[in-house]
Amino acid sequence: MQVCLASTSPARLMLMRQAGIEPRLEAPGVDEEAEIAAVEAAESRTLPPGEHVLVLARLKARDVASRLATEDFDGIVIGGDSMFELDGVVYGKPHTSERATARWHEMRGRTGVLHSGHSVIRVSPGAEPREVHAVAEAAVSFAADVDDAEIAAYVATGEPLQVAGAFTVDSLGGAFIERVEGDPSTVVGMSLSTVRRLVRDLGITWTDLWNRA
């Protein structure tokens, strides 16, 4: 059984490897901002975080699955997307040091929610693709005593610039997080327990995907 990760995220790849799976990697060709704008315009509303990440996870998985369907691919495609919510405000990747710094000043001593969308598509030659999907959430509580110097030093590493919410739990940012409620891997970028359940819904045994020594 082949596994394709429809993502370029190093964190999601690391999770897959730690779970015993060496996936094929394919970058999805999805214009995220344009796609969300189109959905919101069509429905005349702003998508809540859970719907937002699920729409993007499904689009990413479908884009890659459609390409693999033209090959002799027999397996699953996994797509994901994440966003961090604090007091009703949704944060994606900050991209700049100024934004990352401002977010950490807002987050310290508080609790937010990481929303992670998942889509798993079964692709096999001569058969119609089958998709299952779900959203996982985890609450993240940040230490109140993180001072300005620590924030500046952390932002200077560049780590928080390209991750949802401007933090990691499995690397340098982990020391500033006091508690995670929910599947910890959700905060890394993908809920492994959720993906396992989705894979099972497609009739596939999770342990059959193990392909790493």
Image (cartoon, grey):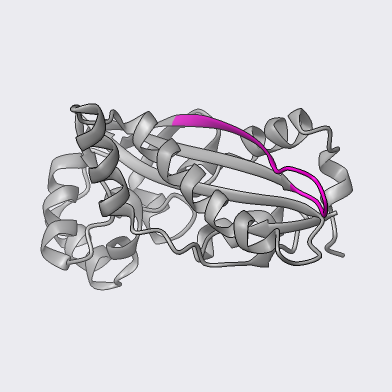
Q: Residue furthest bottom?
A: 157
- In the displayed structure, does residue 123 sit left or right of residue 86? right
Disc tally is 0
Q: Could one spot residue 113 in this view of the protein?
A: no
Residue 21: x %, y % from top left: 76, 57
Which stretch appears magenta? Answer: 123-137
Where is residue 74, by image quadrant?
bottom right
For the residue pair 143 and 104, the one nearer the viewer reads as 104
The magenta stretch spans residue 128: yes
Q: Main secondary structure of the magenta part?
A: strand
For the N terminus, the quadrant is: bottom right
For the C terminus, the quadrant is: bottom right
Residue in the picture at 28% in, 56% down: 93
Q: Residue furthest front?
A: 126
Whether residue 196 is situated above or below residue 190 in the rendered picture: above
Whether residue 194 is situated above or below residue 25 in the rendered picture: above
Residue 79: x %, y % from top left: 55, 49
The magenta stretch spans residue 122: no
Q: Could one spot residue 163 in this view of the protein?
A: yes
For the residue pair 118 and 137, the one nearer the viewer reads as 118
- In the displayed structure, does residue 194 sit left or right of residue 50? right
Residue in the picture at 53% in, 56% down: 63
Residue 35: x %, y % from top left: 32, 48
Whether residue 43 is situated above or below residue 41 in the rendered picture: above
Residue in the picture at 51% in, 47% down: 80
Where is residue 212, by image quadrant?
bottom right
